[in-house]
Image (spheres, rainbow, N blue to C red):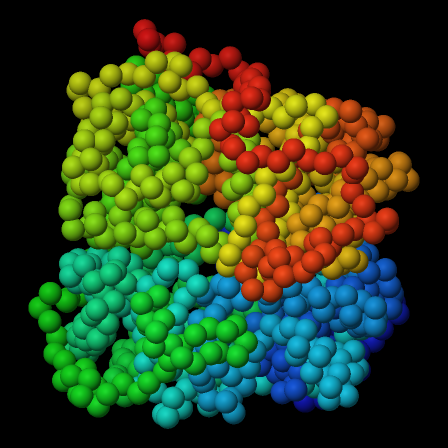
Amino acid sequence: MPAPGECSRAPLASPPAVPPGTGIAAADHVLHRYRDIVKSQEDKRVYRGLQLANRMKVLLVSDPTTDKSAAAIDVNVGYLSDPDELPGLAHFCEHMLFLGTEKYPQENEYSKFLSEHGGSSNASTSADHTTFYFDVLPPHLSAALDIFAQFFVSPLFTESATGRELSAVDSEHDKNRSSDSWRLDQLNKSTADPNHPYHKFGTGNKDTLETIPKQKGIDVRAELLKFHKQWYSANIMALVVVGKESLDELEELIVKLFSGVVDRDVTPPYWEDHPYPSDRLRKRAYCEPVKDLRNLSIDFPIPDNRKHYKSGPGNYLSHLLGHEGPGSLLAALKKRGWCNSLVGGSRLGARGFGFFNVRVDLTEEGVKHVDDIVTLVFEYIAMLRSAGPQRWIWEEQRELLALDFRFRDTLEPRTLAHGYVHQLQEFPMEDVLSAYYLLSEWRPDLVQEMLDLLTPERVRLAVIAKCFGDKCKETEPWYGTKFMQEDISEEQLKVWRSVKSSPELHLPPSNEFIPTRLDLETEPDSTTDAIAPVIIKDTPLMRIWFKRDNEFQLPKAFVTLDFVSPLAYSSPLNCNLTSLWVVLLRDSLQQFAYAAELASLRWNIGNAKHAINVSIDGYDDKQGVLLDKIVESVMQFRTDPARFEIMKENHIRALKNFEAEQPYQHAVYQQALCLSTEVWTRCELLEAAKNVTPEMLDDFVTRVCRSMHVEGLVFGNMRRERALKLADSVESKIPKDAVPLLAQQLALNREVELDKGSWYLRECENKVHKSSCASVYYACGLRETRANVVLELLAHTLTEPCFHVLRTQEQLGYIVFSGLRRAGGTQGFRVLVQSDRHPAYLDTRIHSFLDSAQEYLDKMTDEEFMKHRSSLAAEMLERPKRMTGKASRVWGEITSQMYNFDRARVEVEELNTVTKQELIEFYKKHINSSSKVLRKLSVHVVSVAEGGAGKQAEESTDTPEEPNEQTKGPEAKPVQITDLVEFKCRRRLYPHPQPALNIPRKGTHCKL
């Protein structure tokens, strides 16, 4: 990173900011323009950098083809700058800026405008940055930016909003309290130097932002205003704007709207002193997790190395310590059965300091060998010192990064704005796009300097496992994490100081997956300009679809294969065996295929319920080599008994750990249990998993490979002949005695149909989180074009008012969601709230809001209705920015057996004929409580943890949060679902919806 002020070309005293709308020429408000920004030769967007007169840094991105515009602002300050007496103030300030400004005082003006015009927004607060970003349909960029700019000019921070939004901050912290990643992160901070800002608690809660300040006589609203005035200064802000407009038009717009942000001549804080001084090193911490996790984290303090971005010493060492191929640290650890995965690399703490971290998961055996694992880490570091920095490794990295920069997938406008706005703060304008991609300086001295920092004298260890619970007697104050920290013994440090390089640890071989052929296919193909793919191979065992890309113009392809078998999910036992097969396949391929990942040839083997899925995407040149190896491993799989036992234990632990997932995830899971005909419960899976053996898995794989059907798609820069060759190679690896599946065996699952006029309730307990959750689902029938678009329009219309009422006004909880649920050809509308209130109460509030939506819809003007309709139409027509995104849409139509490859156009044409009255009638029929045909399913996840709504109800003689007259729900009582099997046996099933194309489940060339 450039030193503070190093790249600044602004005068010491900047001219005063001029209010927008004064008619003064843009030239008078721009100090510098940068037109020499380095970009990929394949990038069709055009860029211009600006430094405004108020010293705000700006990146303008013009893209005449974009279907979304976007913007992001980064303020170079975060929670490390919180006043000591107000932890969480920076984060609270971020929340409050959304809730009204002098020019736009309505609390939901911003969110309402974006919702009506196809947009969305978010914000985040980190240690040294606060970032705000949004996207919107291109015609409305100017108006959205006008509202957005006022956040940084004249926010209101009204007293009423301050009090209410504090509940959202508190709820956000409460959601994170049981998250092991948040807990460990704060433990690292709490055990840092207490005089360093890194020691702070950044999220904030009611205690830090209300209770304690009141006791001390601190006016939090006044402090918010003071914080905003002190830090929200144009000279430490960066802005990225992406739009259809020309660069000149964008510049004129930005100058008009953002020149009014005041330059207060603030110096962004820089923390050169590390939060882990010498007396905080050579420490070992034991930590008791919430989930049954086992991890070892090895940390070394390092300086902020971003100023060396052209040589990348941190990347060089991250590449080697995190390598997964032959001779790697991970390979040695797996060989001993001590771990399954490793992540190694440098990361930034905040401006001025960073960390080099090696993190491994631990097996049951690995927990007993923590010191031995650290010994192996130091042996690998010793090997690197002995070998010395290798130019060929750096050059290989440089080549791969340069390829990625040249052929990078187009970024979504919001992702681009959000991703680059930080880099405006850190790098010279001309390098802002290329800073992490184009290496130009080989600096072995910097590699050696960083290696010299990775010593036993500078190490910190954190061991996370349930088995250390007894020795964890200390409590971290903000998250309640139980831990114990001790000095590492001098005897152990001596062992680590004396380690020598081990023969089994060596540098990786050169990467054979680096593409050498990067040409685009130009030979004509009928699919190039077609919307739908074509079937190029159709046999009793296999059907392959193909489409040549004509849009992205990159030397890449996407290949995906489903190996479908009715055995895969036919019982809880088989479901477990499928899962273990998948993880053991991934495990066995890790060393071989890691080089492909480094060469941006991504691969995955995953579960698809009734199938295992193999997918590859990236440069098409070497895809055949990788696919052959993966399919061969699938078909010739044999269980390694030692790895099996490790993965079985992992699998069982993961099933048990679901109990500690967020309440809203339990609500979604319980809803699926009620509505899907074939779904095994976690308890059923857990019981069956205990008895699986390596022999059972080998037998299962043998049977599946002889009873399967392969359905696949090849999409991208690929000739038809190459695609057929890939398909032939896959089919040749299927056992010769495999029996083709019948068409009936390829039929998809069906969904349960709720009775007309019914309301069902599924209730369950959560023992981990203090929060509870209510999820309410309104079934709306089968998917078909007209119903699809009316339901989507209703969801689009109600999203913003639902969030505004239930989250902003009623402050029920941090997580408030409304939207669609689609599964098995059916669809419905869902509202979900996670809160510290009882789910029965939340259900009444959801009910009350949805009934009040009648008035909202009735009063909606024709103009507002048309805004929602056109906004939704534009969103539906939005093109995927990545080849994988487009291919995934096509694949989704194939796997759902709907085959509506032109869905966006067909549905938008239908949407454009929907009237406001039709929308209201749909709402009355499917959502309003007065409907005689309402089909409603509520799921209540009740917290019985300490402080939870269920626990409070147990300890109280009153009924949980009895609603008053104004908040009462429907008079009818729900029918409880206690026996899932009985419930589903007594219900009808929905038929499958009619596909867009009549394509048989088995190919036309198949005799079965």
Q: Nearer the viewer, residue 88 or 871?
A: 88
Q: Quadrant of residue 379?
A: bottom left
Compared across the picture, whether 451 is left or right of 236 comes to left
Compared across the picture, whether 882 is left or right of 840 comes to left
User: Residue lying furthest left in this view?
Assistant: 503
Which image quadrant: the C terminus? top left
User: Residue lying furthest front in this view?
Assistant: 957
User: Residue lying furthest top in this view?
Assistant: 1007
Return the x and y of residue 476 as percentages of the image width and height. 48, 78
Q: Quadrant of residue 504?
A: bottom left
Q: Nearer the viewer, residue 967 or 501?
A: 967
Q: Quadrant of residue 989?
A: top right
Return the x and y of residue 493 as percentages of the image width and height. 21, 86
Residue at 37% across / 54% down in the picture?
Answer: 403
Q: Nearer the viewer, residue 822 or 365?
A: 365
Evaluate whether residue 211 shows in this view.
yes
On screen, 658 above or below 776? below
On screen, 42 above or below 634? below
Residue at 28% across / 29% down in the picture?
Answer: 726
Return the x and y of residue 416 as percentages of the image width and height. 57, 57
Residue at 57% across / 72% down in the picture?
Answer: 126
Residue at 34% across / 24% down in the picture?
Answer: 566
Compared across the picture, whether 325 is left or right of 1 comes to left
Return the x and y of residue 955 as percentages of the image width and height. 63, 61
Q: How many marks?
A: 0
Evaluate whether residue 175 shows in this view.
no
